[in-house]
Image (tube, helix red, strand yellow):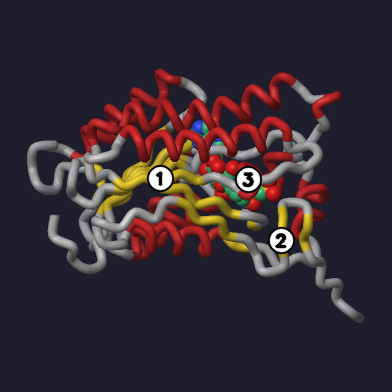
Amino acid sequence: MKNSGRFSLKNKWVLITGASSGFGAAAAAAFGAEGAKLLLGARRVDRLQKVAATAKKSGAVAAHFHALDVAQTASVEEFVVWAKGKIGNQKSKSGKLHVLINNAGGAHGLDPVATGQDADWETTLQTNVLGLLRVTRAALPLLPHDDGASILNIGSVAGRTAYAGGSAYCAAKAGELAITRVLRHELFGTGIRVGTIDPGLAETEFSLVRFKGNASQAAKVYADANPLVAADIADILVWVASRPPHVNIDEILVKPVDQVDAGKVFRRTTKK
Ligand code: NDP
Ligand code: 8X3
């Protein structure tokens, strides 16, 4: 394979799970600005419609969306059949999926193990771990060999450390990291790139979901902090996917400068 320069994302198909908010929505706009063709999935289709419209304004050559629940095998399989239909003739030069972004996920609850809820644990593991496996299994046949394709998984600082109340989420993101490393072995020799981007504190709807819609509790997570924003992660995803095809960025751990560990965030209280 020729070791050429930056891998162009123009006219390349990019599939993003969890594209209805946060990192996924920002990634849609960022890959759109590169002139990519987008396949967007999440459960909230009304949100996806808006994200797709914004991505088109950013420069996306195409921005299609479809309902996806990564916690359901049937939904994932139906979504990938839909995606295959949009991509079109897989034997043609343009009929390939070049970037798969496994982003859908999140945390549910912050209870210690002693009082943890089965439903929270199950949803956390279903989405972040099993969802990633299901989507990857279904989409793998669409990824070309030796043509600069990438699988980019969203992990977390939570997968590399521990904090009270993080049990299922820390386990899930440690699982995501393990699956990323396994895929590197399994796809060895195919030319398909695999990497994980593991963010620290980032202000999205993440805490609103974790605290089941309690906006004031969610706001406290970011109060007086200087968190990452979704566009920071979208920038990194574009950068990773656009490295020359022989370059695999295996793992990125990215935190705000004011965060050294999951539970250690510097708070800049405003002096009045
Ligand atoms: P958001 O809550 O803003 O976005 C989460 C996205 O995941 C939404 O689009 C949501 O869509 C989607 N999603 C959740 N469950 C499912 C499901 N069952 N099927 C399909 N889509 C689903 O949070 P973030 O953008 O922050 O989160 C994105 C990823 O980043 C997650 O994996 C999260 O764990 C990870 N992360 C977040 C950090 C942060 O501090 N914000 C830090 C490190 C990692 P919908 O509800 O419409 O289905
Ligand atoms: C989100 C970061 O620290 O809330 O993955 O777990 S943290």
CA–CA distance between discs 1 and 2?
26 Å
Query: In x, y percent, where is residue 149?
Result: 26, 48
Whole-percent x, y for residue 120 in the image: 70, 26
Nearer to the camera, 197 or 16: 197
Left or right of residue 94, residue 255 in this image: right
Q: Residue at x 23, y 52 (%)?
A: 148
The label on residue 239 is none
| Quarter-of-image position of residue 240 | bottom left
Among all residues in the image, which is located at the extreme bottom? 272
Q: Are marks 3 and 2 in contact (CB under 8 Å)?
A: no
Residue 37 appearing in the image: yes
Q: Is residue 259 above or below residue 191?
A: below
* Total number of numbered discs in the rendering: 3
Give the labeled residue for mark 1: 101
The quarter of the displayed image where residue 200 is located? bottom right
Question: Measuring 43% from the left and 28% from the top, which residue is drawn there?
Answer: 133
Residue type at tag 2? Val
Identify which amino acid the numbered label 1 is placed on: Ile
Residue of label 3:
160
Left or right position of 137 against 127? left
Instruction: Tell me if residue 243 comes above or below residue 204 in the rendering.
Output: below
Foreground tag (1 vs 3): 3
Helix, strand or loop for disc 2: strand
Residue ID for mark 2:
260
| The N terminus lies in quadrant | bottom left
